[in-house]
């Protein structure tokens, strides 16, 4: 579930907020984050992708997200394999 405030068809309206709420056990974003921390060269590629996507989809939040999805999915899978369930012990 996501909660967003401050997005308009023309861009951000002042301060923008984007809050993710996940089910216990859904650690994909943490695997993605930690993989990028462990692999700065991949983080640099992600940074380049985000800059390119921002230029192309500046006022299209859905397009921006779709354009990053394949990269994020691939890196998340790699993170899960490499980091081997690091977050299993984190349960609320």
Image (tube, rainbow, N blue to C red):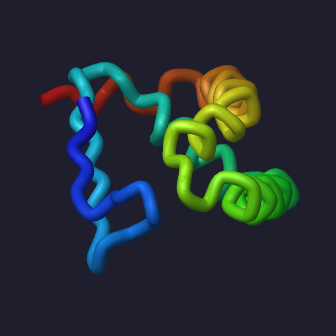
Res. 54 in view: yes
**In this image, 35 relative to 47: left or right?**
left
**In this image, 3 relative to 44: left or right?**
left
Which corner quadrant of the image does residue 24 belong to? top left
| 52 in relation to 71, above or below | below
| 92 in relation to 50, above or below | above
Counting from the top left corner in percent of width and height, residue 43 is at 75, 58
Counting from the top left corner in percent of width and height, residue 16 is at 30, 67
**In this image, 21 relative to 45: left or right?**
left
The N terminus - image quarter: top left
- Tell me which residue sits at (30%, 54%) in the image: 18
Counting from the top left corner in percent of width and height, residue 53 is at 73, 53
Res. 40 in view: no
The C terminus - image quarter: top left
| 26 in relation to 14, above or below | above
- Tell me which residue sits at (67%, 61%) in the image: 54
Counting from the top left corner in percent of width and height, residue 17 is at 27, 62
Which corner quadrant of the image does residue 67 belong to? top right
8 or 24: which is nearer to us?
A: 8
32 or 53: which is nearer to us?
A: 53
């Amino acid at each position: 579930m996501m909660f967003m405030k401050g997005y308009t068809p023309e861009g951000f309206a002042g301060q923008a907020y984007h809050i993710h709420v996940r089910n216990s056990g859904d650690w994909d974003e943490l695997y993605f984050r930690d993989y990028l921390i462990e692999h700065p060269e991949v983080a640099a590629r992600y940074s380049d992708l985000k800059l390119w996507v921002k230029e192309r989809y500046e006022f299209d939040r859905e397009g921006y997200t779709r354009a990053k999805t394949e990269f994020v999915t691939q890196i998340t899978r790699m993170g899960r394999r490499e980091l081997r369930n690091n977050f299993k012990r984190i349960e609320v």
